[in-house]
Image: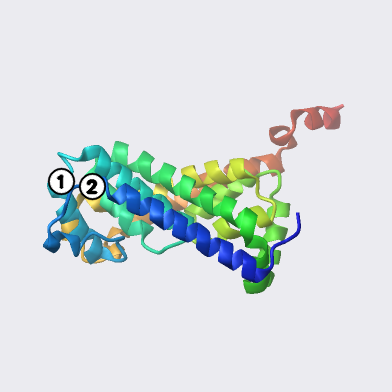
Amino acid sequence: MAELSFQKAATLCLLIFVCAAFGLYNVYLQLPNFSPEELVYIKLPRNLDDAKNLARVISVYQSTHYYPVMSTWCSCYVFMQTFSIPGSTFCSILGGFMWPWYIALPLICMCSGTGASLCYLMSHVVGQPLAKRLMPEKMAEWREKVQHHSDDLFNYILFLRITPFLPNWFINLTGPLVGVPLKPFFWGSVIGVAPLSMLAVQAGQTLYTLTSTSDTVTYKSVIFVFLSAVLSVLPIYFKRKNPKFADPSKAEIKTK
């Protein structure tokens, strides 16, 4: 299959976006009819005030339209993740406001992993010419790191999702182009977003009292994320320190 030109890839990407936006609009149509005053606040949250205003409106309808509200929230979250639209943090906070943590956290993790994987698949089709034009050096650097961690890609993706070393949009877009298989990419994303998502869910429980997203950052939350990151790379450490963790058959050969 011949590689698409930059112009064709950009056009196809735009077409996919329009189709996805149309699908999201159809999901929105299942919601109840809002008053003109409420409609002002029905939009993808881009900041904390947007999330608060949207929460006030949704809280009125959630008990009577539980599943339409949930499916619309999930669709918005996946849409934002797929197209790397800023604001998913505020969606996570909103999820923590609407549902108890044992519902909100799995929803956030699965929606995040699904959206990231859809972005991965889209990039697999149209991403090569775009990445070559827009960020060739960064992609080459990450390809080397992926090759270095080829035996530990799940833990490597897990670590990257927990830590801020690489932006999520970059991981999503370049993952298929540098040789990251979909399976470790998906599960590394689903599990890797859990620590930070848990903090967002906790923030959602006190949404109306928040003045900034920085209010969620405490020394306890920093320690929690740090320990999660350390745990994610421990298997890599043990594999490299002791070969039997990586391949028992090789360890047996060395001991003979």
Amino acid type at circle 2 is: Leu
Residue situated in front as seen by the camera: 184 or 232: 184
Q: Spatial distance from mark 2 to mark 1, Cα to Cα? A: 9 Å
Along the horizontal axis of the image, is 128 left or right of 50? right
Could you tell me residue 32's position as x and y percent? 18, 47
147 relative position to 75: left or right: right
Q: Residue at x 30, y 64 (%)?
A: 214
Q: Answer left or right for 88 relative to 127.
A: left
Q: Position of residue 24 (x, y in %)?
A: 37, 52
The label on residue 17 is: none
Q: Residue at 40%, 64% (x, y): give it.
A: 86
Relative vertical location of residue 107 with respect to residue 121 in this rendering, above or below: above
Give the camera-side residue of 57 and 20: 20
How many neighbours does mark 1 have within 10 angstroms: few (below 14), some (14-19), or many (20 or more)?
some
Say which mark, if any, is on residue 31: 2
Query: Residue drawn 12% across and 48% down?
Result: 60
Judging depth in this view, the residue of 143 and 14 nearest the camera is 14
Quadrant occupied by the C terminus: top right
Residue 235 in view of the camera? yes
Question: Which residue is at a point 53% across and 54% down the rendered structure image?
Answer: 119
Disc 1 marks which residue? 61
